[in-house]
Image: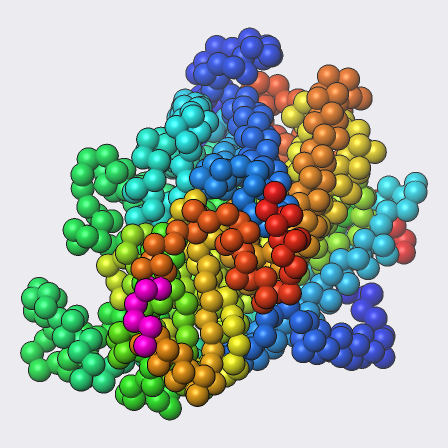
Amino acid sequence: MAQANITSDMVGQSFPHPDEWKWYHYFTFNIDHKVIGIQYLVTAFFFYLVGGVMALVMRSELATPSADLVDPNFYNAMLTNHGTIMIFFWIVPAAIGGFGNYLVPLMIGARDMAFPKLNALAFWITVPAGLMIIGSLFFGGAQAGWTSYPPLSRITANTAQSMWILAIILVGTSSIMGAVNFLVTIWKMRVPSLKWDQLPLFCWAMVATSILALFSTPVLAAGLTLLLFDINFGTSFFDPDKGGDVVMYQHLFWFYSHPAVYLMILPIFGIMSEVIPVHARKPIFGYKAIAYSSLAICLVGLFVWVHHMFTSGTPPWMRMFFTVSTLIVSVPTGVKIFSWVATLWGGKIRLNSAMLFAIGLLAMFVLGGLSGVTLGTAPVDIHVHDTYYVVAHFHYVLFGGSVFGLYAGLYHWFPKMTGRMMNEPLGKLHFVMTFIGTNLTFLPMHELGLKGMPRRVAMYDPQFQYINIICTIGAFLLGLSVLPFIINAVWSWRNGPKASGNPWNAKTLEWTTASPPIIENWNVLPVVTEGPYEYGHDPAEVSSS
Amino acid sequence: MKQIPAPLLTLTIGVAVTLVSLWVGFNHGLLPEQASAQSVLVDDFFDVMVVIGTALFLVVEGAIVYCTIAFRRREGDDTDGLPIEGNLPLEAFWTAIPAIIVIGLGIYSVQVFQDMGGFTPGDRMPDHGTMIAQSPDASLSGLVPAGAEPELLAKSVYGFGAPLEKEGIAADLEVNVSGMQYAWIFTYPDSGIVDGELHVPVNADVQLNISAQDVIHSFWVPQFRLKQDAIPGKDTELRFVAIKPGTYPVVCAELCGGYHGAMRTQVIVHSPSEYQNWVQSRIAQAEPTTAEAIATNPADLTDTEYLAPYAAEIDFDAQLLAHLAH
């Protein structure tokens, strides 16, 4: 512990810096974790808008059964890059890079991450990756889906596909750097008075996330490198005509990409466990259960990937083994949901924008989880695999879940990050539009898939047009819902009422410093005297009821 | 947890949730009609999950809505809620209940999967020659221990084989299915018929030997609840019994290129006599339509032409169809 203390003090002394950052510092190779966190968040939000426009192109095309708006190959480029951007350039960097970098050192009483320069490098290599993804669109765009299964990915739009692969390998490398940094930081840099069972649950979630990223990301990089060699250098790892095996690619891909789902949701679960107790004014219900369930999801989550391949070249035992392992994942996830509901029970819930998004997440994640159970069983998955039922499911989890969680986090920590409060009426308008838009867009998709509409199609059976029009209307409402948020964020950042150091009266360490925090977070490191969620213990604050 | 409602209230809510869940589970109407023996098995399983899912959904969403209303902060109240940090029996309860449910669903999955024939892909009669086709690869043969049954080799076929009671019995009809951008070609080895549509007799045990010529495709008949990828370099199969005469769509479910969405055809389930008539007429008229079936690329058709075959099925009038295409 003494050692950790010395390390964090040394970080503070190791680089000269001005008293506060100016706007242009945010465009440089800056090693302050808070600057890097905001760099990630703003960049990721930009890509969210890009990916959103792609979604609107697709929904416009799908307003009619025939392919009459855009070229079908362009449509495939849209669906490929929509998925890629939303996953690799929005949710993952915003949740892990953005909130992880900004919050972890502040929550554990450290002056910075363990490896600040590695941290800055991890952000800056995502910039060429983003440029390459956007650049690939000028070469037709990758068109084989975000899964990029060969042989299709070997024979379609080779230049764009190669750029796509290089971009993903770069963000994967960034993810590995970040994971090492988080693990070492949480392990070694905690302020000595912070015990393991006082570690905020967001940090536990980041531990689980980082372990997953470390185990799984290299496998994706390997698979994509082999594909890159196949496309450009004449190898035939995935060329069946020369003895290659296309199913092997699917294993390499999903060994990473299923855990990637947990990379996108575990940090969000962490955000939930911070936002809910603060605004429900209650201790988190079942701290240990939530912390352990993150680790359980991390462990079991490494052994469920074949449920994406139940209709592929997989032997019977594999289909059954992964049915059971997938079903097991729902247990720790259920524990979290129940714990959050129990945290709400008997609270004094402040229904502000952050809390509304958190409760909205809870409401929608339940449906995403339940449809996930049906998808996890091979007999039902055989029918609905690669249909709109799957699209509905993962948007409930990733939009209703991850994106709502990101918004909850943004409303919750905006005062800390900017020193300004956000506008509540605009935030509530944003929530209502997003909640209605999400359900209008994605709820009807369950029926589409069950009734027989495959996903990733630019043209479809006209019997499905009615439901598709509902989805398209919902998608445009979702598109509009971003406007109140952008107006709110930009206006509040400049003109919002000043925020105090602890506007929510919260107990975690990031609220013990100024808003925004000074460059090295604290003049004198805080001393932890109580747990992060000990609300209602002060008799004066508990109501008599 | 002092706010636990009175036992009577709990009982009433429990009964109501159960009744609503059961009703939803068996009346959701979300699945297309059942046209294969397998579809009945899958639907029963799905309905059970809908019942359980609806019950969980109602309880959890109900709790969320109740909390949001009953425990919202009142104006001017800046106090905290009760300092409840956990409740071990309650936590054990809500860990155990989902665990028991998923174990039950896991066992049910294995049962349904077995009844569907999921454990026996590649289970062929020796005289069908499939195993011989599998084994010329000398290196593969070398891996098999001496004296091992040749069936071991046949296990590298994926998909769905014979249901349990028919294990080891050859299918009534075999059809070779080949996926290509953007069409399905059906070849009947017994009669030499080649067609762009799949014709099968009702109540017959049909085995599809599925292959792909270019990229991965996926053979799906929603009304059969069966899907199997067609994978270049791998043999897959689907075995099914159609139980209801009619015409059902065959859909490609794996992204296979720009016109993936147009890679559709149909399966026609005939009565046995109709099926014989179809076989006789196809043999009589020889092969002219074969070339047509292969040569017609959906990409070359206008949408109206392409969608025309569906017009009858979905009761769409042609004018509207033409209108949609523009």
Q: Is residue A164 above or below residue B108?
A: above
Location of residue B216 by image quarter: bottom left
Image-based side of A418 in relation to A191, left or right: right
- Whether residue B109 can be seen here: no
Instruction: Name the foreground residue: A151 vs A39.
Output: A151
Q: Is residue B1 above or below residue A438?
A: below
Residue A265 screen position, x and y as percent = 55, 48
| Residue at 53% in and 49% down | B303
Q: Is residue A94 above or below residue B66?
A: above
| Residue at 17% in and 70% down | B134
Location of residue B51 by image quarter: bottom right
| Residue at 64% in and 61% down | B316
| Residue at 71% in and 21% down | A490
Instruction: Name the foreground residue: A271 vs A521.
Output: A271
Residue A145 screen position, x and y as percent = 43, 44
Image-based side of A519 in relation to A81, left or right: right
- Direction bottom: furthest residue: B165
Query: Where is the C terminus of chain A found, in terms of image quarters?
Result: bottom right
Image-based side of A226 in relation to A449, left or right: left
Residue A421 screen position, x and y as percent = 76, 26
Q: Which residues are magenta?
A: B284-290
Q: Is residue A138 above or below residue B222?
A: above
Residue A192 screen position, x and y as percent = 52, 36
Residue B287: say if magenta: yes
